[in-house]
Amino acid sequence: MSFFEKIFSPHLPPRHPRRRPAYPGPLTGAALEGLFADCDDLEKRALVLGGGPVTATLYYIDGITAAADISRLVVQPLTDSARLPAPATAKACIARIEAGAVYGCTLRRRDTLDAAAEDLLRGYAVLVFDREELALTFEMKANPQRSVSEPTTEKSVKGAKDAFIENLRMNTALVRRRIASPALKICQTTVGRKSRTAVALVYVDGVADGEFLAELRRRVDAIDVDGLLTTAYLEEYIVDRPRSPFPQLIQTERPDKFALNLLEGRVGLLADGLPLGFLVPATLPELLKVPEDSSRSFLTASLLTCLRFIGLLVTVFLPGFYVAVALYHQEMIPVKLLLSMIDSKQQVPFSTFVEISAMLIAFEFLQEAGLRLPSQIGQTVSILGGLIVGQAAVEAKVVSPITVIVVALAGIAGYTCPNSDLENTARVLRFALVLAAMAGGMFGIMCAAALLVWHLCALESMGVAYLSPLTDGGIAALLRGLARLPLRLTKRRDEALRTPDKRAQK
């Protein structure tokens, strides 16, 4: 196996998922208290149900449950002899409660310690009967979450103004509002031995391919980590080639984009605590599209899509191309431009490679500083760095003006990319192309470009070619990747997604 095959080889999770550990032991109050020993936020209250012989203990976790709702909707009905008239046995009491003696709308019967503990951690109040290894759980979740707000990283121009938040059920509701059909399926599972994070698999029945769905479900079930707290745990365990720098999941914070891709035949993932939606399979042309393309005229949307492709090529290749031409191929430069470059570099003490590398690094410093600082300070730092420091460097003859122009153009072109992960990949490739240009000029750039194209052609996302539909063959497939056809002519879904329902429009 070659070096590049080792680096970019698929690293998939095992086919048979590891069994997640459960909480062993009988379902009793003592077992539940022992499981949550030293947890000061666990609250309990002993109850005599209906004033009769049956006793039970109510457990809940302070902070994730609403104590006032528990008192009003659970404790009061359970202790009211009029609603629960002195049941003789626990089974009779349970039957009465399940028939509507308690006001809580969500009621579950649990007979294992594992299920009761998980409900307790999800914001349920757990009623454990003293003489029965049985519990009833009532949903009493508190509401400590931020409200739905506008997208911050994916700006919406002509689309909806709401974005995903950190609450899974609210995120599924945002998707359900857009696809109000029973065909929208939401299958929930748990990931993380310690965090027990809820993850929802979202798809449209009859549109999503069954193989995509089964494979994604297998990979999610195979995730064996302590906690699912960041997006990396999903990405590196789900994608085909986690060592590749290119994003193989479509990440979005916009529910309208998420729903649009579901209707095209993709399968989505939503995780509790992450204000993002994930979609597979991902392709490079899809990463360069935005939901507003369907809101604009097809001509404008096509031109803007092509502009993003050009911007991606410019941000990756322009600095390296300038280094190669300035160091090895001065004959490619027009005479007047060459004389201007020579005049501007006469008093600059550094080579072109050092100039470009230093300016790219300085640009990365400014970008990271602007992201990490508060918004008002970050804007000030960007302006000071871009204008004052850049102008001072040129006047001090540290760098030449054309170097500043090349780096600025490359940076601005990178901002046309709508996907932040793909933009970060372009930032890495930019440095790689500069090193290749310094080592071999245009020959080095061509070799690096050939390796890049080879890797992109070999890359797949859930079995779909990463460059699809650009590599599917035919003018129609190429136009579908580079442009947006009129909606009246877009009758069928993408063939690469292998959707059972081929017709997008009638």
Image: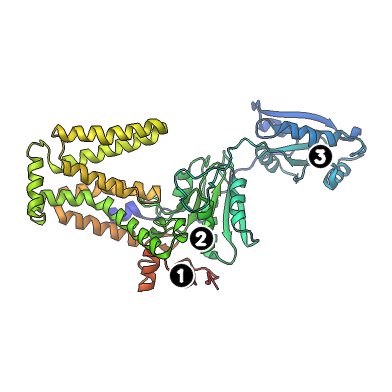
For residue 173, say whether it is visible: yes
* Contact between labelled residues 2 and 3, with CB atoms less than 8 Å apart: no
Q: Position of residue 390 (x, y in %)?
A: 22, 35
Q: Which residue is mark 3?
A: 132
Mark positioned earlier in the residue sequence (3 or 1): 3
Crowding at dot 3, Cα within 10 Å, few <14 / some 14-19 / many 20+, comes out as some
- Callout 1, which amino acid? Glu
Which SS class for mark 2?
loop
Cα separation, mark 2 vs mark 1, equals 12 Å
Q: Position of residue 504 (x, y in %)?
A: 53, 69
Cα separation, mark 3 vs mark 1, equals 56 Å
Q: Position of residue 357 (x, y in %)?
A: 21, 41
Mark positioned earlier in the residue sequence (2 or 1): 2
Q: Quadrant of the N terminus?
A: bottom left
On the rendered structure, is 387 left or right of 174? left
Q: Which residue is mark 2?
A: 266
- Callout 3, which amino acid? Glu
Q: Which residue is mark 1?
A: 495
* Contact between labelled residues 1 and 2, with CB atoms less than 8 Å apart: no
On the rendered structure, is 156 left or right of 134? left
Q: Which mark is residue 95?
A: none
- Callout 2, which amino acid? Arg
For residue 129, say whether it is visible: no
Q: Position of residue 258 (x, y in %)?
A: 52, 54
Crowding at dot 2, Cα within 10 Å, few <14 / some 14-19 / many 20+, comes out as many
Mark positioned earlier in the residue sequence (3 or 2): 3
Q: Residue at x 7, y 39 (%)?
A: 346
